[in-house]
Amino acid sequence: MAIKEDKNKIPVKFRNIKRSFMDTISLNNDHSFMSFPKELNFHGKEKGEQVVLIIRSHWIIYIPYLFLAIIIFILPFVLTSLMPAFFSNVTLLISLVITSLLVSLGIMVSSFVKWFYTVHIITDQRVVDLDFTSIMNHSMAEAQLEKIEDVTHKQLGIIGSIFDVGSVYIQTAGAQNEIEFLNVPRPRDIHDILFDLLELKQKGEI
């Protein structure tokens, strides 16, 4: 069931758009799938350009990193219980606990930063794909809506079926032949939203 729309949230140009589009885009919004975010700017955004959707990877993708961080954190305590004589030195034990804590925090912070800054943006003029792998390594690709030739989506196996996770592939006519939104929530809805935007753009409604 669609959430109740906030008329102040919906940009003027979209308030008279067909019902099915607005129902899809306003359903179950969260930090991984956010429609009409306010005050969002990115490099190259033009005056009057409206951000329709901002998408991040589904949280389920980062569960293995969380488990790894937990295992590393509890590892010193497990080793202490298995080999108490070896870890009878308090200084050694404290050093190991602090090291494991720092490594665990590093994994969690790195995962959060990657999730937060790896974003896929859909506006009323273009799609933007920002991939953030590390502070020293990130890439950005974009394509105008009129350059999009085809959109397909693929669910992520059993996990994808349970949690509605998958990838969206956007074929373009530009130098960047394909833009990928990987491991995102609601891939079918993203697919439908893009097709609706292309239709609205062709009709001159946006």
Image (tube, rainbow, N blue to C red):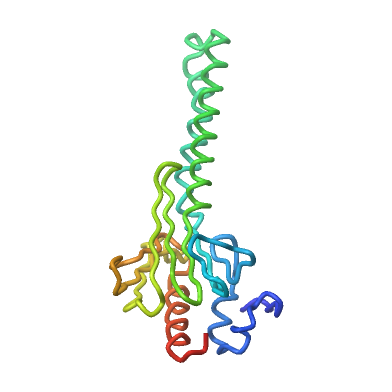
Q: Residue at x 46, y 85 (%)?
A: 201
Depth check, front residue: 83 or 123: 123
Q: On the rendered structure, is 14 left or right of 123?
A: right
Placement of 200 over or under 188, stated as above or below: below
**Furthest residue to the front?**
47
Q: Residue at x 48, y 69 (%)?
A: 186
Depth check, front residue: 151 or 176: 176
Whole-percent x, y for residue 44 in the image: 48, 64
Placement of 137 over or under 175, stated as above or below: above
Placement of 14 over or under 154, stated as above or below: below
Which of the 4 image quadrants contains residue 40?
bottom right
Q: How many marks?
A: 0
Placement of 197 over or under 64, stated as above or below: below
Which of the 4 image quadrants contains residue 33?
bottom right
Q: On the rendered structure, is 177 left or right of 76?
A: left
Which of the 4 image quadrants contains residue 141?
bottom left
Q: Residue at x 46, y 73 (%)?
A: 190
Whole-percent x, y for residue 85 in the image: 49, 9
Whole-percent x, y for residue 15 in the image: 63, 85
Depth check, front residue: 69 or 114: 114
Quarter of the image for the N terminus: give it: bottom right
Depth check, front residue: 24 or 158: 24
Whole-percent x, y for residue 32 in the image: 54, 61
Q: Residue at x 50, y 51 (%)?
A: 115
**Furthest residue to the bottom?**
203
